[in-house]
Image (cartoon, grey):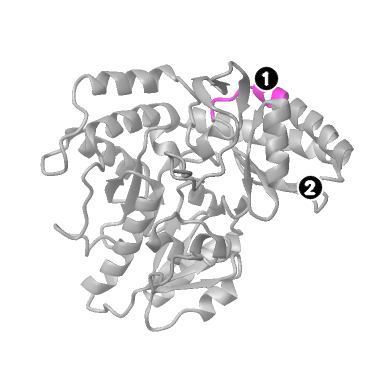
Amino acid sequence: MTITPLMPVYPRCGVRPVRGEGCYLIGEDGRRFLDFASGIAVNILGHGHPALTKAIADQAATLIHVSNLYGSPQGEALAQRLVDKTFADTVFFTNSGAEAVECAIKTARRYHYANGEPQRHKLITFDNAFHGRTLGTISATSQPKMRDGFEPLLPGFTTVPFNDLAAAEAAIDDITAGFLVEPVQGEGGVTPATGEFLRGLRALADKHGLLLVLDEVQCGYARTGTFFAHEQYGLTPDIMAVAKGIGGGFPLGACLATEEAAKGMVAGTHGSTYGGNPLAMAAATAIMDVVVNDDFLAEVRAKGDRLRQALEQLIPNHDTIFEGVRGLGLMLGLKLTDKAVARDFVAHLRDNHGLLTVAAGENVVRILPPLVIEGTHIAEAIEKLSAGARDYEAAA
């Protein structure tokens, strides 16, 4: 037998974490890494945060799982808090971001079905998007690396260029259900939507009776300095998928919707055995207790500004490999020139300087620290980035 016990779909690196402390990961060999990847924007309170670990431990000792055949006091309470803090009137809890997007797609299609227009099933999506790895969510992207070998894919998606409002409008026809879009594309290159584009999609949806479906799996949950990124654009969606930071490391996602958008989601139309179990709800409640307040969000914005400024000051010293900074809040991307390769540079920082980052499309290094970083962590990350750039340039 040559296949590994873990299905070899990940090209795993040599770092093997066994413990986390705040903004650091510790490998099985004892080496410490400054974690500016956060489990790909998941560990928003870092590692071992006392409020989160206590909530999980206490709930694990009380009740872990019962299924959704029964009433859910914990789920009802968390859903109410989300409703109170967002545009939404109702919430469905999932186990992952991909499942949250799947629920959002189903909700959008079912809305038109409930209105007597079942032919309106097509969602307009955008180049470089990443919505997950299920058959439904890879059907919503145009990236061959996600799609190749999995055909036939789910019909009902048309992909047009991101930030191109005219192309989005031109794609509308009599079978269109709505738009599915990330306010900030994460995997695609940490590229924010322009205000004109995102507000334009909202206006088009209103004009044509369509639904605006946002994927805030990566850019939501305080990552960009507001509870959700769309708040910075002055608009509200009809449906939104969230995950990653919602559980701070515990697997959890959610689909949020207005009462109107969710009108077709009646008993029997959707479900999840594990979704919204008491343990997940305890973790998510602890996260909300920490992040959903004005002071915390203001700190994220201030830290994001400080980190961005420090990154921008690096560029003139290493302009052969650094081109620019993009993103919002603490969801930042360092765009590299054609003299460097993002995946190689991420590996170089990790292996030689103990800094964890994540590669993204368009030759971008994603910088996704825990939202609880302090000034010392920013200074350490910049020092490691600078040293890594010097080494990388010298070896080129």
| Residue drawn at point x = 26 percent, y = 57 percent | 259
Which percent across, then down, holds residue 268? 15, 58
Query: What's the amino acid at mark 2?
Result: Ala
Seen in the image, is 342 located left or right of residue 286?
right
Viewer-proximal residue among 373 and 237: 373
Residue 46, numbered circle: none
> For residue 316, what is the image quadrant?
top right
Residue 42 coordinates in the image, percent (x, y):
47, 36
**SS at badge 2:** loop
Q: Is residue 372 magenta?
A: yes
Say left or right for 210 vs 91: right
Disc 1 secondary structure class: helix
The mark nearer the N terminus, 1 or 2, is: 2
Q: Is residue 22 magenta?
A: no
Q: Can you see residue 130?
A: yes
Q: Is residue 306 visible?
A: no
**Residue depicted at x 69% and y 30%:** 351
**Amino acid type assigned to the residue bearing label 1 in the image:** Thr
The N terminus sits in image quarter: top left
Query: Residue tagged by mark 1?
Result: 376
Region of the chain picked out in magenta, as a range: 371-380
Q: Which residue is mark 2?
A: 340
Please tell me which residue lies in front, 351 or 50. 351
Which residue is the extreme one toward the bottom? 174
